[in-house]
Image: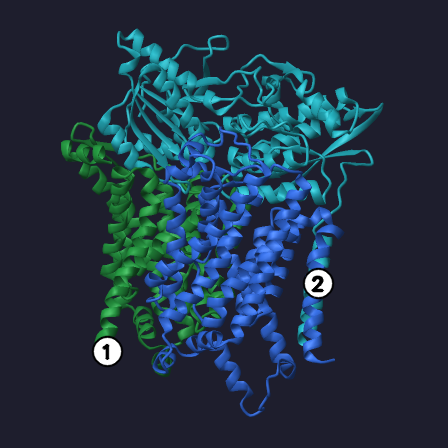
Chain colours: A cyan, B green, C blue
Amino acid sequence: MASFRNLKLTALAAVLGFALSAPGHAKVEGEEIILGSAISLTGKYSSNGLNAKNGYDFAVKRINEMGGVKVGGKSYKLKVVYYDDESTPARGAQLAERLIQQDGVKYMLGPYSSGLTKAIAPVTEKYKIPMVEAEGASRSLFTQGYRYLFAVLSTSEQYLASSISLAAEMAKKEGKKPADVRIAMAFENDPFSLDVRAGVVDDAKKYGMQIVVDDKLPRDLSDMSATLTKVKALKPDVLVVSGHEKGATTAARQIKEMQIDVPMIALTHCESGKVIEQFGKSTEGFLCPTQWSETLTYKDKYFGSAADYDKAFKAAYPDYKTVPYQTAQASAAVLVWKDAFERANSFDTEKLRDAIAATQMETFYGNIKFAKEGNNVAKPMVLRQIQSGEYKVVAPTKWASSPLVYPRNAGM
Amino acid sequence: MLDNLSLLGQAPVLNIQLLLDGLFIGATFVLAAYGLALVWGVMNVKNLAQGDFVILGGYIAVTMAEWGLHPILGLPLVIVMMFGFGWLVYRAVISRVIDRDLFTSLLATFGLAIVMAQTMNLIFGPEVVAAESGLKTRSMFDGMVTVAEIKAISLLLAAVLATIVIIFMKKSRMGQAIRATAQDARAARVMGIDTDRVYAFTYALNSAICGAAGVLISLIWVIQPYFGITHSIRSFVIVTAAGFGNLPGVIMAGFGLGFAEQYSGFVLGAEFQQATVVALLVLILVVRQIQQARHRQVVR
Amino acid sequence: MSTAMTQGLLYGGIVLAGIVAPFAFPEYTFQFALLWIMILFALTWDILGGQMGYNSLGNIFFFGAGMYLCAVTQIGLYYDVAEYTAAFGAVKVDFTMGQYMLGLGLGMLAAALGSVVLALFFGRIVFGLRGPYFAIGTLGVALAAGELMGTWEYVGGGGGISLPVYPGDPDDRALLYYILCFVAAILTFAFLRWLYGTRFGLALNAIRDDEEKAEAMGIHTTRYKTVAWGVAAFFLGISGAVFGNMTGFIEPLEVAFPTTTFGIFMVLMVLLGGKGTLWGPVIGATLFHVIKEVTWTYLLGWQWITLGALIIVNVIYFQQGIMGWARDKWPERFGVVVDRRTTISSRDEEAAS
């Protein structure tokens, strides 16, 4: 009968399909250790998703070339299984379930962006699967008491904190009070940028600074001229913008075209937004917070120094003119895994979790030591300024290679 | 919000900036929307891939700029290439959805939009890019109002293109055939017009217009493979507001949308910029429905 | 075998399969739960799109509305919502099992009823629109809702809301949400099966076939249309509430109001299965979900291209869907008496509707 056929058809399709959709990876297959990651290969985060994936792949390749991971006297190669999370949290959570439940992945690498990490962390937590993530900076990730989440990067409130304190310093130098400083803010309406914003608001409050523009940029952002018109009218002392690389690109283009001459402009994602390459001289003086810089003096035995990593990565991926920090920290996350496997000398997830929690290592990316909450507390955020078309570290003073140029001389 | 309004009161010159910016971006909206009005009106195809044609045009311009050809000089080339591309798409997909119900064209072009966006992602990569014009910015009123020369030029180019299309539609044989087909396809066929060719030409023309709009967008804004859908939605808002047979309406609505985006971004905050576009769409439909209801009352 | 027996066996089989599935393949529980949600999507879309001939592109609006209504209820019962969201999940609230279940139950109720109220309200606005304008109008409502939610700080704006964490064992949680999805989908199916057999169902078909005539025959079309949308909203609201809790983190544009993914997928699933039939949406949703998962596994990088191409081919060449095709092929089995003289013209009519 018709309805019978329907049932058979449906059932057949379902069974066949789900059987097909599970390639059947185990946690360790033969001589391979399988790591899993849902990463944004399509959708709005896809460019940084790709940066992160390249970072993972680059580190995996390097570790495998150098003899792989030794556990129990045997040497294993690393392999990463990827799924495309389409840049949406709902899909990310589904894929994490799928990696863990269907594919049997026991060791996770993080996705790109705080929003995705927020969606995936509850899943890994639920199954007690350790996840070392490199791209979710939102500090709300580390207040939930997650036991299995570890992040190699600095948290979001640190992104622009040093620019605000620099602004206060400069005000004092000019004989003004920090409370006279006026800030214009434009943050993308997404979990990461809103979190960065919360950090800036707190810092501004601390100094008693005034916030004169507080716009939230839409996510399909390609125009912020209305916001910049306000900036022009109100003439603030500091302009801060955060909106992943599309925010950086859009801001850089329109700051140039509208001749916004705010003395201090701070912008996240300058490197991945390729602002110098695309807008040249007009980006002079932008302050760009970064998780990592190739000029820092950290080093490790896999990649050598930060500069060596920079060189080797550019040789392997010639498309990159500047290596974005998103790539470097992804590589660092893989190093954490390798280190943890060897110290735990086991494939047991609980032992591995404890090994990761006890991580204390120097990598080309920076020192890594996790707080109880899972965030990396051993590595500071670095603030770079674009000077003569290059990124120069201006803060913290320990790493500073050049003094801050203030006010920025806008080379229009 | 009130702060921002009072700011406009204190410095009325800011209105000039907002109006100018609205005018510049409105011009590119008008181009894409006019293309949509054309295919909608002539062949009853609701092209959801409109925005992806725009983005594709932008990417071709950016790629040519990398090879050393200035995007403005490359504009004719983009138009020719996009015309060819549109013709191909017509032959492969669109020719099979004409004369079918509204949903067929809407969904088929949605599928097309997905394929295009993803193919662009594979070819050009996912980075946000922009084409550089190398032109300067002029400032007026003490720097309070700035006009990037490229924006003014793109407005001019949009106007020239629109004029060419209008003259073409009025004077040329093909233009007359298109209009005849739009009025009554069956009658046109009886009169010996090859309507299939007319449809192919119309769709290709739309693709070319979108491509040109894309070049301008890449020069004044930024593009990314997945930005197509917002441009499609804008085109739909404009055409829905204006009605598809109504070129002056499309122009008015396009500029109106440009102004609305600028003012809502300024007064309400940038987070309302997109919301304004869709809220306007709903509002327009509500108003239209009230009008219709009144009309139906009369009929009854 | 009598029809009643066959049907009994069929439904029994499906229910049994639904109950056994999470125990037989525990690793697929989440995947199966999602499949039931997809089936629910397709079934509810078909009420308007298939049975009534009104192609809505904005049904996803109720999914998101339900999700937010449920989340706000769950949190609001024990905590100040504005404070909870202002901290971007920085506040960690531990719920006891009793609190959690009560919150979830009331949340789902609020989601279902709230969505119905919204459907009645927006129905007044959109049902005056015809043809393409109805599709665009409903799309506009869904898009606007997503954008406006993103600006509303009370519910966290673009930062979204992290939902309360399930206090028990993770496997129990998976099972709980599986059961909720399963029951919601089965209830939807059963309700619609009953509904389509009543006068109400016939009235919907009459509106699809000729609205003016239906009106002339004394059917209060606007009322029927609104109620039909309310039915869809009721079940979609529940699905949103469940899905939001399954995901654990909600935000406006991608999770709650995914207009260009789930919102359009529900239409495509129905078209694939065959619209205007009871079984078409079920088959279409199953097939679509499976195809999507398989391409996402094996065609990384090309998955969207494959999906897009599939959509184009489906829409252009196979719009009658699987059920429509089967009905054309074996009309007798569907109880259609074929008069050979009129076959061709009647098929044309069908294609036109």
Task: Classify residue A239 as left or right of residue B88.
Answer: left
Q: Quadrant of the rendered structure where residue A99 is? A: top right
Measuring from the top left, give residue C77's x and y in whole percent: 46, 40
Chain letter of disc 2 in the image: A
Quadrant location, the N terminus of chain C: bottom right
Label 2 amino acid? Ala
**Secondary structure beneath disc 1?**
helix
Q: Is residue B207 visible?
A: no
In the picture of the structure, the residue carrying the numbered disc 1 is B299
Measuring from the top left, give residue A324's x and y in whole percent: 53, 27
For mark 2, does the 10 Å Cα neighbourhood hold few (<14), some (14 to 19), or many (20 or more) residues?
Answer: some
Q: Residue at x 61, y 59 (%)?
A: C288
In the picture of the structure, the residue carrying the numbered disc 2 is A11
Q: Residue at x 61, y 48 (%)?
A: C177
Q: Is the residue A142 above or below the residue C264 in the image?
A: above
Q: Do pointers 2 and 1 mark residues of a single chain? A: no
Measuring from the top left, give residue B193's x and y in whole percent: 37, 77
Q: Quadrant of the rendered structure where residue C336 is? A: bottom right
**Secondary structure beneath disc 2?**
helix
Q: Quadrant of the rendered structure where residue C313 is? A: bottom right
Looking at this view, name the residue that lies furthest to the front: C98
Task: Classify residue A12 as left or right of residue B83.
Answer: right
Q: Is the residue B211 above or below the residue A291 in the image?
A: below
Task: Classify residue C212 as left or right of residue C208.
Answer: left
Q: Residue at x 53, y 20 (%)?
A: A292
Of the pair B269 and C229, the residue shown nearer to us:
C229
Chain letter of disc 1 in the image: B
CA gap between label 2 and label 1 equals 53 Å
Of the pair B151 and C232, the residue shown nearer to us:
C232
